[in-house]
Image (cartoon, helix red, strand yellow):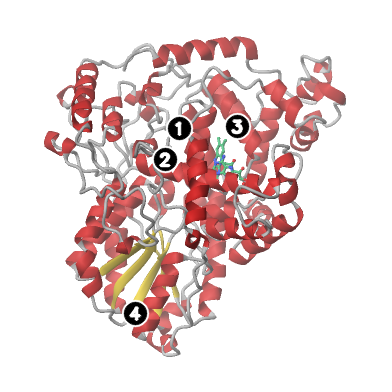
Amino acid sequence: MFRAVRFLRRSPTPSPSSFVKLISPSPHAHLSVVPSASFQSTAMAPSKPAKRKAQTTLLANGITKTSNITLSKKRKTTASPAPTPAPALPGSSPPTDQPPVENLDPLRAPHPSHEISSANGIVLRAFYPREMSNARARAYNADALPRPMETLNASLAAAAAQRVATAVGRAVVHWFKMDLRTADNRALSQASDKAREAGVPLVALYVLSPQDFEAHLTASVRVDFMLRCLAVLREDLARLDIPLWIETVAERNKVPERVLELMERWGARHLFVNLEYEVDELRREAKMARMCAEKAMALHVAHDTCVVMPGTLRSGTGRPYAVYSPWYRAWVRHIHENLELLELSEGPSRNPASAREIFAGLFDCDIPPPPENKRLSEEEAQIFQSLWPAGEHEAMKRLDKFCEADIGGYAANRNIPSTSGTSNLSVHFASGTLSARTAVRVARDRNKTKKLDAGIEGIQTWISEVAWRDFYKHVLVHWPYTCMNKPFKPEYSNIEWSYDQEHFAAWTEGRTGFPIVDAAMRQLRGMGWMHNRCRMIVASFLSKDLLLDWRMGERYFMEHLIDGDFASNNGGWGFAASVGVDPQPYFRIFNPLLQSEKFDPQGDYIRKWVPELKGVVGKAIHDPYGRGVGPQAKKAGYPKPIVEHKGARERALAAYKRGIESGL
Ligand SMILES: Cc1cc2nc3c(=O)[nH]c(=O)nc-3n(C[C@H](O)[C@H](O)[C@H](O)COP(=O)(O)OP(=O)(O)OC[C@H]3O[C@@H](n4cnc5c(N)ncnc54)[C@H](O)[C@@H]3O)c2cc1C
């Protein structure tokens, strides 16, 4: 299975004239706070006539530069598999009909190294087109291509009047996605209000899409967790006489049509959803909005997953923030000025008793098994079930326990992977069993000041970490090509990465000979989760010490993390590999040995996850072959380092510099 990013293949290919077509702007769009997009009709990016000239120059530059490009022959692909033709999957629109590269205009032409990114499983060709050119990424930056969020807003705006005029019908539907909870769920709450006011039942729906799991590289452990959450959700809803209908739809591009068919069958005309901000999902929802309008139905979308809706915050010059610290200050200020953002939504009301008769068949719905290629073994399932109990009640329990016992020491302990210094809540944020709003609200309320940036240091720091999650979703919405295998700064596409499969296998299996890296990679396999400090260490090691394409690591994480979340994962990789928004500068390269000594000083974390080194005492644990216990490590089967850090560092510095200066 190949890596996927959320990029719908059938993206409308823009005609040259559409490059300057912008969605109708609102000069105040960046200031407005709109809790539900069913009331929102404006695009998020204001257009500025002054920008047009720069755009033209930029595009013209891109065209001149990219049109003469031939495929790079220099890249090191020796150990990589040969390019394979894209397999055709039903419903996935296999990209076999693309014209030859030389016939394409620069914004449609792929990046020169597109064959490499396809062959190495970075671009999932069964679902997505070839890696885009840097010119195309820059066209998004220049507001010359509509962002998926803008397209969705335009579709919603076109249907605004109809949404208000549409009669309710015999039921109202809430479509659950990554919001698997009843508490503080914006769209669910709105759907419930609509149903109650009209005196009709609320019906809940979940669509299981195996192709989406495949295209988005959803880890088996994550699928297992979500299915367990659905079982909890079904029970909670049933107690309110609300049915949860769960259906598997084999072809991902048939999902919208199937949802509308079900609504017809149930006599429902209003559909409520919380937005997901990845490209595929925004485009699907734009299509849903159009399809609903054609069928005289109403789609209501709510902004729920972030505390502050992406696109809300802009710098003094009106530009979106590309650096976390000023963005965070604006985030805090904005919440303090708009305290309703921390108001929690009511849970759904009980359905009329008649719901049990009218929709009797919907209450007997089984939780489907995971798709064949996403199954855990019995043994794995048991381990992960005991490590990660599912559902919103467990999420609240964990949040309360963390706030009670650990949040005070969070600032001091959060970087020490051998302690339980962090909340372990990411799995719940990723599946939506806990809202970020609830988490921030509960943490803030423990702070006597009621401020996000004052009072107990641990609370402030923890809230600022939850804010990173909001930040990366803001980045995803404004720079959607980060969701299409491109780094935030397009010129970083030109680095000549290694695709050495032996190095990659050693990294994934935790046998690089760098104990802290190996411990972390084994924690990932053992728990489906890895400590944040270690995520940074292993990501830096992959991209800098091994000079492997960071996107291979990004993919591997998604395939194994129980908390896999596109925006946070992509943001974390972008940071550590120095290719993302607000990254670590590329010349700052983690020294794995120093990181190990600083954050695992006694070697407790290493000994836990690398049993071969259990018997090593003292500081030798951080570098057994360099500190005199090589024979002991060798005897226990622990490998020698696969690279020498100092030399690898020099190689990385040179490769980054060459790539950035290559001028593409
Ligand atoms: C290379 C890399 C990949 C990552 N991939 C993911 C991922 O797929 N999913 C994911 O949820 N997080 C990811 N992170 C961020 C972070 O590592 C995890 O959110 C964190 O380790 C989860 O543990 P926790 O819940 O105990 O975090 P805590 O320290 O308790 O933090 C509380 C919450 O804040 C958020 N948060 C904390 N740090 C970050 C961060 N750096 N970026 C974004 N959100 C953050 C998370 O939602 C987290 O649950 C990644 C980081 C790196 C460096």
Q: Identify residue type, mark 1.
A: Val
Residue under label 2, please give it: 475
- The reply to whether the C-beta atoms of the residues labelled 1 and 2 are less than 8 Å apart is yes
Which residue occupies 76% across, 55% down?
405
Which residue occupies 41% across, 22% down?
492
> Which is more N-terminal, label 4 or label 1?
4
- The reply to whether the C-beta atoms of the residues labelled 4 and 2 are less than 8 Å apart is no
In the image, residue 258 sits, relative to residue 327, either above or below, namely: below
Residue under label 4, please give it: 171
Mark 4 vs mark 2, CA separation in Å: 37 Å
Residue 13 vs residue 20, the one in the foreground: 20
Residue under label 3, please give it: 536
Which residue occupies 76% across, 20% down?
623
Q: Position of residue 152 (x, y in %)?
A: 27, 53
Residue under label 1, please give it: 581
Residue 521 vs residue 536, the one in the foreground: 536
Q: Identify residue type, mark 2.
A: Val
Q: Is mark 3 within 8 Å of ligand 1?
A: yes
Mark 2 vs mark 3, CA separation in Å: 19 Å
- The reply to whether the C-beta atoms of the residues labelled 2 and 3 are less than 8 Å apart is no
Quarter residue 506 falls in: top right
- The reply to whether the C-beta atoms of the residues labelled 1 and 4 are less than 8 Å apart is no
Query: Helix, strand, or loop for circle 4?
Result: strand
Mark 1 vs mark 2, CA separation in Å: 8 Å
Q: Position of residue 275 (x, y in %)?
A: 39, 56
Query: Helix, strand, or loop for circle 2?
Result: helix
Residue 257 makes an appearance in the image? yes
> Which is more N-terminal, label 4 or label 3?
4
> Which is more N-terminal, label 2 or label 4?
4
Query: Helix, strand, or loop for circle 1?
Result: loop
Q: Position of residue 479 (x, y in %)?
A: 36, 38
Q: Quadrant of ligand 1?
A: top right
